[in-house]
Structure formats: C-alpha cells, structure tokens
Image (tube, rainbow, N blue to C red):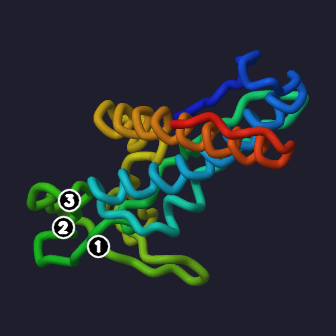
Amino acid sequence: MSRLNITVDTWDPLTGLDRGTLRTVWIRAANKAIAKAKTQASKLVRAEYFLKAEDMRNVLKVYRAKPSDLTAALRARSRRLSLARFQVRQKAAGVQVRVKRSGRGDVLAHTFLSVLPLSRLQVRSREGKGRYPTIQHTGPSPADLIGSEEIFVRLDASVRDDMGTIYNHELGFELQRQGQKAPRK
C-alpha cells in the first residue's frame, strides 16, 4: 500500500501566536495539502498510464489530520485492477492491452473480452480444454503505480512545495483574523 504522510511537528514563536492556534493552522494546512496531493497523484498517474480519473478516485483515500493525530495521510489501495480498466482492443490473435501511454502495448494470445452479468468488461482466458473455468487477467495495483519511483518523487516534491505555500496562506489568514500583520513572503 502506497502512503504519503504530512506530519505537524513545529512551533514558531516569532509569529506571536500561541501553540494551540499554530497547531490549528498546521492542521488546516496539512489537510488542504493532502487533499491537493490526492488530485495531483491522480493527474500524475493518468499522465503515465491509461486510467480514468474515476478509477483513481475510488482507490485513493485521504486521512485528515486532527488535534488527536497530527498526521495527514494519502493511501492507495493495493488490490490489483482489471486489465479492462486500461486500454484494451479485441484482435484476431487475442486482446491487445496498453497499460502505459508510451509504447504499443502487448497482445495477450488466447484471451477474449467478456461482459458477465452485473459486471464490467473483463479480459479473460480459458483454463484447460473445456469452456469453463475462465480466469480474469489483472494489471498493476494503484499502489504500485503511485509507488513507482518517478511518480512518487514528483508527488513528494509537489506536496512539499504546496505545504509551504498553504501554510503561509493559513498563517496569514489567522494573523489577519486576530488583528496582527501577516508576515511577508
């Protein structure tokens, strides 16, 4: 399971705010940053792989920071996705599957596209000589996609940049609310 955490653990006495108020500012900033990270993760994965936004939205979960737990986290479910969630085409030799946007894709020999009752499109193949049983083919899990080196590094850098910007904005808002001058950027 891929996991991205933002932990609140700082106190800046130069702002003139008490610890409780700064803690609230950090919690608000961490929650906004992790929500933005969910969108960013979806965009980064969809730029590299043939996935719909809905598929990524359903597997990413945001755990918000709160006063009792100062960690905001983004987790991706690790169950593998059906190959039919990616780009698939039925060919005479089997099913052509494109998972990554770069490349031509692979043809899986002796496979077929199937729609079972109350189900989505699936990539299946027969096991043995008879008609049944058939097995469903799966691709990578969303956790594997987000956990890939290039995507995770870009996501982490993006979250770090956003966290600083959002924290400064929330701090300025809180100082303005309390009648003090906001620090200059």
Which one is in front in this view, the residue at disc 1 or the one at disc 2?
2
Q: Which residue is mark 1?
A: 112
At 62% across and 51% down in the image, what residue appears?
35
Which one is in front in this view, the residue at disc 2 or the one at disc 3?
3
Q: Are marks 2 and 3 in contact (CB under 8 Å)?
A: no
Q: Are marks 1 and 2 in contact (CB under 8 Å)?
A: no
- Residue 84 in percent (x, y) is at 37, 68
Image quarter in which the N terminus is found: top right
Secondary element type, mark 1: strand
Q: Is residue 36 left or right of residue 87?
A: right
Secondary element type, mark 2: strand
Pointer 3 local density, CA inside 10 Å: few below 14, some 14–19, many at least 20: some
Q: Nearer the viewer, residue 71 or 164?
A: 164
At label 2, the amino acid type is Gln
Image height check: is 174 above or below 6?
A: below
Q: Nearer the viewer, residue 182 or 68?
A: 182
Q: First in sequence: mark 2 or mark 3?
A: 2
At label 3, the amino acid type is Arg
Q: Are marks 1 and 3 in contact (CB under 8 Å)?
A: no
Q: CA distance from mark 2 to mark 3?
A: 13 Å
Pointer 1 local density, CA inside 10 Å: few below 14, some 14–19, many at least 20: many
Q: Which residue is mark 2?
A: 96
Q: Name the mark on residue 101.
A: 3
Secondary element type, mark 3: loop
